[in-house]
Image: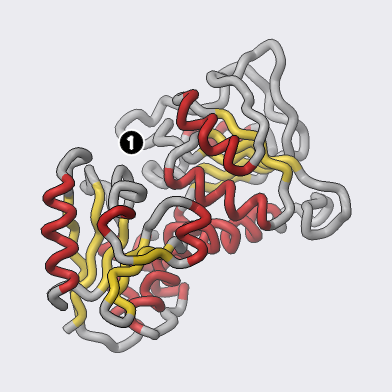
Amino acid sequence: MIHLGLIGYPLGHSLSPKIHHAALEACGLQGEYSLFPIAPDDLQGLRNLLTHMRNGEIHGLNVTIPHKQNVIPLLDELTPTAQAIGAVNTISMRDGKLTGDNTDAPGFLTDLGGLTGSRPDRKTAHQTSEVSKALVVGAGGSARAVVYALTHAGWDVTLSARRPEQAQALASEYHLPIYQFPIPDSQPPTFDLLVNTTPLGMSPNVGASPWPEHLAFPKDAAVYDLVYNPRETKLVRDARAAGLPARTGLGMLIEQAALAFEIWTGHRPPREPLSAAIY
């Protein structure tokens, strides 16, 4: 019996149990995936849960907001990817050690390829020597994974975030320029890709968006919103109304979950039943 779960707070909106139960069934494995809501300042709760994992009672854990960085001091080692990103979303036991990994970055890049590839005439950093520009809104754990993925894929990244100190720390690490937030109407930034990594627009605050209400999007840009609840956020709805390719983070959620599942079990789940479980 495989025992898996998710650490975070709050977790009422999580689709991870549906995805991982579908993965277990698709791979013919017996198991369960549980939610472990742990408050932001409850470090003892984190320690207790990780002790259960050390004891073999839990075989794999996902980590989401607000603990992607909080868990790092409690782990024995990090993979090179998690070390470089500075955030963990997957915990496994390797050779008796609690190991932190990050599948957000490869999961994001895989799903992003489906978005930027949806416009055949759209040039990206993968198709031309001209460097494409991305504006990433946010500076938390998810933003770190997105910035890592984009910079390693050859994108020219600019950061815009609500918390100046957090933004400056991430920008300094990757030598990124910072654009002011909120984004001003008077001097809009130019970019080929806008990525929202903040909770703006997440249910129940579905009327919020990181993009100003009356500001036009850059022509031929693409928009990716990591928020996936609701299924069409205001940012995605507005971008599509402007004729731009846009999507929420559901595809990334599935990809990162499948990669984590493979780390824990050694089984590579097919993506179709995982998508069917949440659509």
Amino acid, disc 1: Ser
| Image spot of residue 84 (x, y percent) | 52, 56
Residue 237 visible in this rendered orientation of the protein = no
Q: Which quadrant holds the C terminus?
A: bottom left
Position of 72 relative to 191 (above/below): below
- Judged from this view, the residue extending furthest toward the bottom is 28
Residue at image coords 37%, 58%: 89
Position of 234 relative to 73 (above/below): above
Colour scheme of the rendered structure: secondary structure
The part of the image, by quadrant, that contains residue 206 is: top left
Residue at image coords 57%, 29%: 160
- Judged from this view, the residue extending furthest toward the right is 129
Residue at image coords 27%, 47%: 13
| Image spot of residue 131 (x, y percent) | 81, 47
Position of 103 relative to 27 (above/below): above
Q: Does residue 82 appear left or right of residue 121 in this picture?
A: left
Q: Nearer the viewer, residue 197 or 157?
A: 157
Q: Which quadrant holds the N terminus?
A: bottom left
| Image spot of residue 95 (x, y percent) | 31, 82
Residue 26 visible in this rendered orientation of the protein = yes
In this figure, what is the number of numbered marks? 1
Provide the residue designation for mark 1: 203
- Judged from this view, the residue extending furthest toward the top is 186
Q: Does residue 103 appear left or right of residue 2 in this picture?
A: right
Answer few, some or many: residues within 10 Å of disc 1's Cα (few below 14, many 20 plus, some between 14 and 19). Answer: some
The part of the image, by quadrant, that contains residue 254 is: bottom left
Mark 1, secondary structure of its residue: loop
| Image spot of residue 196 (x, y percent) | 52, 38
Q: Does residue 121 appear left or right of residue 102 in this picture?
A: right
The part of the image, by quadrant, that contains residue 199 is: top left
Q: Nearer the viewer, residue 102 or 188?
A: 102
